Image (cartoon, rainbow, N blue to C red):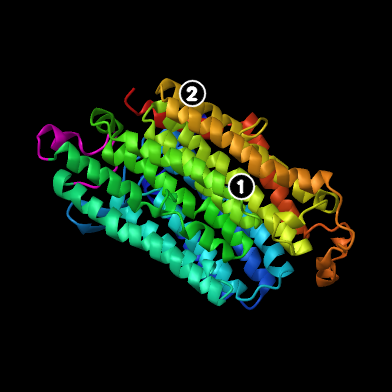
């Protein structure tokens, strides 16, 4: 109870400032990074200090959330009943905790990767990265749909220079696909759905139990139109990569690996599934979805996406492309959890956001490590690489176990809850999808691990990357630069840690589930 007493005498402005402070820290950091651009060591120090400061702010917000119910804090009123406003709630807290903690590790990793590969435009890279994290904080702490939309669009725009970082025709084409699909879906589907919500309910505020109960009861909104609005929201969130609006995700693989890690583990795709959970619970309302039987089609679309993407992943030889299709599949686990409409499945969805983040970032870090040290991008070239890069491939193996859902990794916890959710909802389809996709995950991940550790390296393979890095004295073992190895070891450790200490995320997920209708 000490924490509670401490909060009573804190000045109220500190509580009001807090979510806004989480957005301000990376924004200020972006300016400072740009100013320090000429001095690489200073620039990267500023990046890491900013990331640590953000984690400190989010950690303190976490204490506030446990102690006091959060009221929305409006920053700017746009029109009556619609403002740029922020508040704290369990789902947003999970997202903010993941993003702020992984930003630190991603920054350490980026230093090793960007320098190891002598990438150009490094200052722009770090600035856009900080701006992306600021957008994520805005999404995580948004108090209404309007705020979420503003930061959701901002995230698409500030990640565009990261996707097109290399500036090659291929990168620019991928950037056009990326921005086209993400902005197209949000402007053509999510925005009209928001307008309809505002017209029928007079509010876009995130409300316990959703905002649609009244208009449906009055007969002002037909169940068919309600279903259409729900569908427009679900497909308006292009970042959730539900098929067929998933193509931007493999396209964005041309970006440097730290960007892939940001897109696939931390910021962009999580913004998608976070928005799907948030809209289902606080805008549409789980009760209304159950009443008008609207979760059904989403369940089938998510299930289809899980299985089809896993199947496509089987046939990808490029490591990052295989990981990209794996992400499309894993994201739909979260959508599936939301579509089952049970508190336990929502809890599973919330936990899987965390489990997937730590596991997938580990896999991408390992892919970048292989590229940096050995200049290999295809799975068929990885025979025996585990002997030269034991740390990298051990971390990769842990990430793999988490994706399949095996103990002792975080992925097991979320799969377990998902299975319970499917069982509770008596959905044979969901159970079949989970079992099938688990087998497919094993089929496209385990051969990589087998290849790395149990096959002989090819005779002629002199580890071509070595002459590239002769100025690194720790390259005699063939591992990537030290910052890369440190980062991927930490994320792998966190993936295992999540299995033994899931309380941080399960606690929030339970708070979320308790607020839902049983």
On screen, 426 above or below 383?
above
Residue linked to disc 1:
314
Residue 88 seen by the camera = no
Element marked by disc 1: helix
Element marked by disc 2: helix
Task: Please give the name of the residue rendered at 38% of the width and 35% of the height, measured from the top-left corner.
Answer: 339
The C terminus, quarter of image:
top left
Q: Which mark is residue 420?
A: 2
Of tags 1 and 2, the one toward the viewer is: 1
Task: Please give the name of the residue rendered at 66% of the width and 30% of the height, measured from the top-left corner.
Answer: 407
Q: Position of residue 296 (x, y in %)?
A: 33, 34
On screen, 82 above or below 63?
below
Q: Position of residue 347 (x, y in %)?
A: 45, 31
* Left or right side of 474 for 516: left
Residues 274 and 127: in front is 274
Task: Please give the name of the residue rendered at 24% of the width and 28% of the height, measured from the top-left corner.
Answer: 291
């Amino acid at each position: 109870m000490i924490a509670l007493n401490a909060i009573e005498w804190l000045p109220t402005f500190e509580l009001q400032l807090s979510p806004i402070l989480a957005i301000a820290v990376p924004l200020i950091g972006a300016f400072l990074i740009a100013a320090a651009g000429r001095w690489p060591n200073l620039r990267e120090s500023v990046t890491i200090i900013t990331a640590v400061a953000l984690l400190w702010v989010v950690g303190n917000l976490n204490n506030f959330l446990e102690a006091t119910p959060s009221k929305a804090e409006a920053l700017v009123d746009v029109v009556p009943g619609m403002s740029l406003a922020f508040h704290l709630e369990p789902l947003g807290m999970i997202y903010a905790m993941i993003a702020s903690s992984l930003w630190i590790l991603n920054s350490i990793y980026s230093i090793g990767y960007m320098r190891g590969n002598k990438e150009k435009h490094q200052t722009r890279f770090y600035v856009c990265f900080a701006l992306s994290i600021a957008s994520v904080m805005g999404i995580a702490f948004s108090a209404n749909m309007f705020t979420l939309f503003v930061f959701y669009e901002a995230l698409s725009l500030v990640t565009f220079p990261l996707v097109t970082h290399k500036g090659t025709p291929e990168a620019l084409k991928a950037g056009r696909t990326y921005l086209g699909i993400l902005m197209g879906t949000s402007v053509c589907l999510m925005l009209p759905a928001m307008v309809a919500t505002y017209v029928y309910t007079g509010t876009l505020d995130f409300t316990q139990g959703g905002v649609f109960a009244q208009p449906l009861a009055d007969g002002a909104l037909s169940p068919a139109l309600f279903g259409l609005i729900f569908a427009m929201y679900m497909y308006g969130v292009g970042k959730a990569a539900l098929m067929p609006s998933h193509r931007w995700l493999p396209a964005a693989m041309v970006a440097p690996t730290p960007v892939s890690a940001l897109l696939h583990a931390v910021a962009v795709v999580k913004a998608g599934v976070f928005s799907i959970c948030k809209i289902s619970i606080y805008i549409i309302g789980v009760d209304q979805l159950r009443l008008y039987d609207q979760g059904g089609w989403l369940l089938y679309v998510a299930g289809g996406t899980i299985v089809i993407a896993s199947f496509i992943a089987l046939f990808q030889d490029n490591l990052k492309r295989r990981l990209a299709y794996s992400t499309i599949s894993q994201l739909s686990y979260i959508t599936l959890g939301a579509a089952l409409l049970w508190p336990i499945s929502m809890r599973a969805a919330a936990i899987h956001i965390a489990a997937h983040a730590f596991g997938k970032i580990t896999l991408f870090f390992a892919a970048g490590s292989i590229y940096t040290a050995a200049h290999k991008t295809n799975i068929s070239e990885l025979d025996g690489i585990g002997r030269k890069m034991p740390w990298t491939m051990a971390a990769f193996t842990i990430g793999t176990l988490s994706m399949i859902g095996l103990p002792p990794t975080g992925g097991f916890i979320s799969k377990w809850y998902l299975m319970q959710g499917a069982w509770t909802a008596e959905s044979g389809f969901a159970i079949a999808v989970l079992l099938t996709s688990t087998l497919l995950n094993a089929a496209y991940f385990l051969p990589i691990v087998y290849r790395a550790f149990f096959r002989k390296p090819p005779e002629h393979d002199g580890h071509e990357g070595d002459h590239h890095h002769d100025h690194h004295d720790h390259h005699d073992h063939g591992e990537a630069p030290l910052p890369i190895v440190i980062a991927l070891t930490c994320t792998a450790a966190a993936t295992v840690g999540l299995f033994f200490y899931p309380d941080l995320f399960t606690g929030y997920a339970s708070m979320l589930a308790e607020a839902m209708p049983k």
